Amino acid sequence: MDLIRTIFLAGGASLMLAGEATAQSQTADEYQQRQRDLVELASVFGEMHHIRRICEPRLESDIWRERMKRLVELEQPGFEAREEMVKRFNAGYRNAGGHFPVCDRRARDHAAGRAVFARRLVGRLSAPLREAERTDDGPLILTIPQDAE
């Protein structure tokens, strides 16, 4: 679960900066892809919220809900995009609850697989920052160590 934590701690800061860095330079296709990625990330957050509540209730009972709130706060999506993100978070939570009523190996394996998927999303969402960093004009960003897996 440390990989999952690393992904979203590093990703949260980079997503905020990436959103600011790309707001004016995105094409319509890039914007739509970013919105799809944010919605998918919200769904993963919902799944993780359920699984962590059943697997580690004393440690992280609401951490994923708080991370979802922070993601929305950092991204500042429009009303419709925000509603879709919230809808997908809730659907992810319900879906995970239907498949994983108890914490077992399947639930943990599912969470690990979704963390890998989320890492790809965070990578794509933070790509504009990496590009800005290469030009030395961009902001300082946090990166996920490659050996974190």
Image (spheres, rainbow, N blue to C red):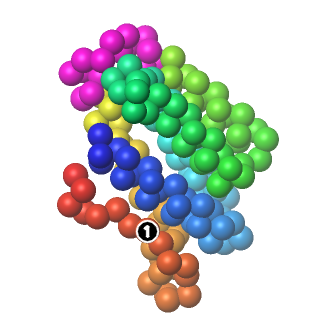
Crowding near the residue tagged with mark 1, few <14, some 14–19, many ≥20 C-alpha atoms within 10 Å = some
Amino acid bearing label 1? Leu
97 relative to 2 in the view: left or right: right
Return the residue nearer the eye: 58 or 115: 58
Q: Position of residue 44 (x, y in %)?
A: 46, 35
Q: Position of residue 81 (x, y in %)?
A: 70, 41
The answer to whether residue 74 of the structure is visible from this angle is yes
Q: What quarter of the picture does the N terminus occupy?
A: top left
Q: Which residues are magenta?
A: 95-109
The total of numbered circles placed on residues is: 1
Q: Residue at x 50, y 23 (%)?
A: 93
Is residue 101 highlighted in magenta? yes
Residue located beneath label 1 in the image: 142
Secondary structure under the numbered disc 1 in the rendered image: loop
148 relative to 94, above or below: below
106 relative to 73 in the view: left or right: left
Q: Residue at x 79, y 41 (%)?
A: 79
Q: Position of residue 39 (x, y in %)?
A: 57, 40
Q: Residue at x 44, y 15 (%)?
A: 97
Q: Residue at x 55, y 79 (%)?
A: 139
Q: Residue furthest front?
A: 58
34 relative to 48, above or below: below
The answer to whether residue 29 of the structure is visible from this angle is no
Q: Main secondary structure of the magenta part?
A: helix
Where, by quadrant of the figure, is residue 23 drawn?
bottom right
Is residue 99 highlighted in magenta? yes
Q: Residue furthest right?
A: 79
